[in-house]
Amino acid sequence: KSKKNGNYLKKLLINKIADHPAIYEIRGQGLMIGIEIVKNKNQRIPVSYLAIELIVNDLKKRGLLVYPFCTNKFSGVSLFPPLIVSTEQIEKIA
């Protein structure tokens, strides 16, 4: 179920946000999904922690809890929905 729901969530995210200039990659396994966010897609320059914090806070206001990651090489957010997540909830997340 984790693999099936994770693939569905990744597919929805790819369809909705992968073309955005700040989204470098959407990756993961099962329901553990990472969205890498960059300043420059061609050079893979990560955004600052402050930018990630703003995104995390905005998503939290919308009811979605995500986990930030930010290093000198990578920045973005991770999603870890529970194994009991429903199809409707996956669609709302996306």
Image (cartoon, rainbow, N blue to C red):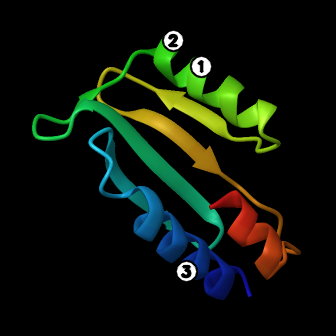
Q: Do the residues labelled 3 and 2 touch (CB within 8 Å)?
A: no
Residue 30, position as x, y percentages in the image: 61, 74
- Label 3 vs label 1: CA separation? 26 Å
Near-viewer residue (33 or 87): 87
Judging by the rendered image, the residue that carries numbered circle 2 is 50
Near-viewer residue (30 or 89): 89
Judging by the rendered image, the residue that carries numbered circle 1 is 53
- Please tell me which of labels 3 and 1 falls first in the chain: 3
Q: Are marks 3 and 1 in contact (CB under 8 Å)?
A: no
Q: Do the residues labelled 2 and 1 touch (CB within 8 Å)?
A: yes
Residue 45, position as x, y percentages in the image: 22, 27
x 19%, y 36%: residue = 44
Label annotation for residue 7: 3
- Amino acid found under the numbered disc labelled 2: Leu
- Please tell me which of labels 3 and 2 falls first in the chain: 3
Q: Is residue 62 left or right of residue 40?
A: right
